[in-house]
Amino acid sequence: MINLQKRIKGVDENKKYMDTRICIREKLLTEEVKDLERTLMGDKVCRLTFPSPGVLHEMHLTITPNDGFYKGGIYHFDIKVPAEYNNVPPVVKCLTRVWHPNINEDGAICLSLLRENSLDAFGWRPTRNMTEVVHGLASLFTDLMDFDDPLNQQAAEQYQQNRNNFESKVRDYIYKYARQ
């Protein structure tokens, strides 16, 4: 019996299946990375690198917002693409400490398109791709901040109660954690 949940967690009784999924993932990523590199060429906000040459399923994204609250900060993300990609979304973690309603202090990210099971129409679907992921992450620092469904409740409440204090704390975090 096929058990996708076990396979997503890395438990695979059928080695041939997993080898096939990895092959599919690598083919998809080869094309998507080419498109992404073309899209990001000359982009001053997003920069994508690969820590291990030839390993496309592990990526490092750097976002340097050029306007808004987070301008002047440099934010690093670790992106891992599981073997079950494109049936499941990539796993993304923010490596930079940030005061943000949709990113908690541990680096977890609340972004609909990274949700495997989303109640809205914006969750992960097999038709999504890495370009959408990168643009979605960059948009968290501009127009996609969600104060209605926050992951970091304290940041959202502070924004709603005292926007100046929120902005001051964002600036403090940029100074302490997001300048390299």
Image: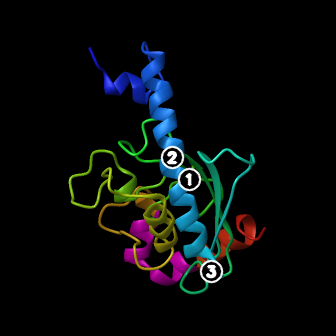
Label 2 to label 1, Cα distance in Å? 5 Å
- In front: mark 2 or mark 3? 2
Q: Is mark 2 on a helix, strand or loop?
A: helix
Q: In this view, does 80 lie above or below 154?
A: above
In the rendered structure, which segment of residues is drawn in magenta?
A: 155-167
On the image, numbered disc 3 is attached to which residue? Answer: 43
Q: Which residue is drawn at 47% across and 79% down?
A: 142
* The C terminus sits in image quarter: bottom right
Residue type, mark 1 in image:
Thr
Three-letter amino acid code of the residue under disc 2: Lys
Residue closest to the eye, 128 or 165: 128
Q: How far apart are marks 1 and 3 (CA)?
A: 20 Å
Neighbour tally class for label 2: few under 14, some 14-19, many 20 plus, Cα within 10 Å: few
Instruction: Determine the residue positioned at 32% across, 56% down.
Output: 127
Q: Residue 94 carries which label?
A: none
Which of the two discs, 2 and 3, labels the residue nearer the N terminus?
Answer: 2
Residue that numbered label 1 is attached to: 30
Q: In this view, does 84 lie above or below 136?
A: above
Percent x, y for residue 168? 59, 79
> Residue 66: where, in percent of width, then height?
61, 85
Mark 3: amino acid: Asp
Residue 21, how many percent across, how many down?
Answer: 45, 33
Q: Of tags 1 and 3, which is closer to the observer?
A: 1
Image marks 2 and 1: residues in contact by CB distance under 8 Å: yes
Circle 2 is placed at which residue position?
27
Callout 1: SS: helix
Circle 1: is it few (<14), some (14-19), or many (20+) Cα within 10 Å? some
Residue 166 lies in the magenta stretch: yes
- The CA span between labels 2 and 3 is 25 Å
Farthest right residue?
180
